[in-house]
Image: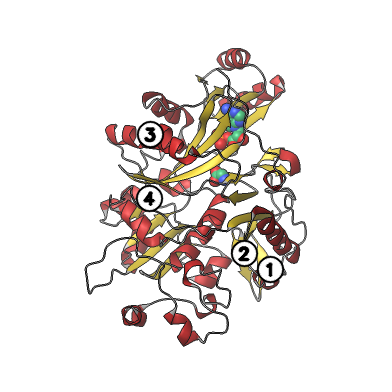
Amino acid sequence: ERSRYCLRWPGCYYRPHLISSRSDFYGPFHVPFGASRHEKVRFLVPSAPLFERVPGTLNTMKVLVLGPGGREHAIIRALLRDPEVTEVHSAPGNAGIAQDVPVHAIDANDPAQATALARELNADLVVIGPEAPLVAGVSDALREAGFDVFGPSAAAAQLEGSKAFAKKVMEEASVPTARAHEARTLPEAEAALDEFGSPYVVKDDGLAAGKGVVVTEDRAVAVEHARACFEAGGSVVIEEYLDGPEVSLFVISDGKNVLPLSPAQDFKRIFDNDEGPNTGGMGAYTPLPWLPEGFVQEVVEKVARPTVARMAERGTPFVGVLFCGLAVTNRGVRVIEFNARFGDPETQAVLARLRTPLGQLLRAAARGEISESTELDWDPRTAVDVVMAAENYPDTPRKGDAISGLDKANALEGVHVIHAGTVVSGEEIHTAGGRVLAVVALGENLGAARDAAYEGVRAISWAGAQYRTDIALKAVENRIHIPAPRD
Ligand code: AMP
Ligand code: GLY
């Protein structure tokens, strides 16, 4: 076993400082405290190989991860734990990613630039993080050039890119979702608002990075959002309001077979108690102790499998993560939305618990080789992450402030910091975006994980930093209730 891993070592890329004294960081590998660097290498042995190897050989892979944010940083950290992953590269990355792997300053949304970089690196697998490159056709260009790609084609990414398209596929596949009307004129929109009643749900039919939705009890606000969407040249989708707690479930799809990850909950609004405007997400935790038994399997059967099957029938197979945004309502589970990628900041929590080697899993998906009987291996602990955002996020976030306390947070037991909007400026790390970073903590239970995450948050500061103080609080206090079933 040991010599096999030594074999890969000469070509192996890793950052010595990543093989730290904190064994939780490396999840499955249990690097003991105080081990020398040479000794630590020996401990890089996976808990269980995910896929069969040809005896006597070792599958190694060089992975290129496209995207700039926290989700990509979390994906990269998980890839670095996979013993078959010998090198990871990032484009364009951020200051935190650059501490872990080489970064390449290209426009990752440009199919030609992404393909040129993958060729230059001779990448074995390209993982596409955000939605923008997917919709821009980056995955199509890479696939055409012969690369294994984790991320759907532009056509399949329409499940996220167009709410109206997603509704159509759900209807064709009999997937439970909110009733909806697509409106192209203001009178149509108003008629739909009145049909469904308050609370009103108005969605811009285009890619809006999760911000083009207004949920309000004020009819005038709903009408105003519809008017703004029409003025911008779009159409809107008006929906029936779904009650009940929300769940994010990521389902890995190879185009045919599906494998669900551990469910998570996100916090979309900027302020405590779900007040203020929608954001990309201000924190997350996983798993969800309040979910009914069999929930994940139900979503696989009623949502993921039929959607993936329908996409294949349409001639646009979905290869990547089908992110099911769900409401657990009094009439059962309903899809709020699909995304065609991992969620941010849920990924930071979900992948912190994943012990199954991620590179092997994503490569199997890219190659159409997912086995539905695969049992994923999860850290039994709970993960919580809290996003720290810049002043004035989500409007026009303030940038360029020096961040302090990162080392202190990272040194806490069970805690690590994932970067999103950061840049290196001289000796310092500065804020460079709306969501700046996420503090992730693993704990024996939800309360412990939550406390550790907030201890990390309190260690970090910059001018104008803001964060929610109630991430995972309702779940800790047992205050999440699924509405009683209704006929
Ligand atoms: P979306 O971009 O579709 O995910 O919507 C953003 C957020 O708006 C969701 O996470 C929900 O919190 C809320 N939302 C969207 N659609 C509905 C709905 N039909 N009923 C209730 N809340 C919704
Ligand atoms: N956290 C929700 C999203 O990634 O859209």
Image point (51%, 34%), residue name: 337
Q: What's the CA distance linking mark 1 and mark 4?
A: 36 Å
- Classify 117 as above or below 17: above
From mark 3 to mark 1, how far is it between C-alphas?
Answer: 41 Å
Task: Tell me which label, 1 or 2, sits earlier in the chain.
Answer: 1
Mark 4 sits on what residue?
138
Q: Is residue 1 visible?
A: yes
Specify which label sits upstream in the sequence, 3 or 2.
Answer: 3
- Of the numbered discs 1 and 4, the one sitting upstream in the chain is 4
The residues bearing labels 3 and 2 have C-alpha atoms spaced at a distance of 35 Å
Return the mark for residue 417: 2
Does the CB distance between marks 3 and 1 fall below 8 Å? no
Quadrant where the N terminus lies? Answer: bottom left
Q: Are marks 1 and 4 in contact (CB under 8 Å)?
A: no
What x and y, as percent, mark residue 160?
46, 38
Is 419 rendered above or below residue 310?
below
Q: Any atom of ligand 2 within 8 Å of the CB at mark 2?
A: no
**Residue at 40% over, 25% down:** 174
The kind of secondary structure element at disc 1 is helix
Cβ atoms at labels 1 and 2 below 8 Å apart: yes
Distance from the alpha carbon under mark 1 to that under mark 2? 7 Å
Secondary structure state at the residue bearing disc 2: strand
The earlier-in-sequence mark between 4 and 3 is 4
Outermost residue toward the front in this view: 293
Q: Is residue 99 left or right of residue 372?
A: right
Mark 3 lies on a secondary structure that is helix
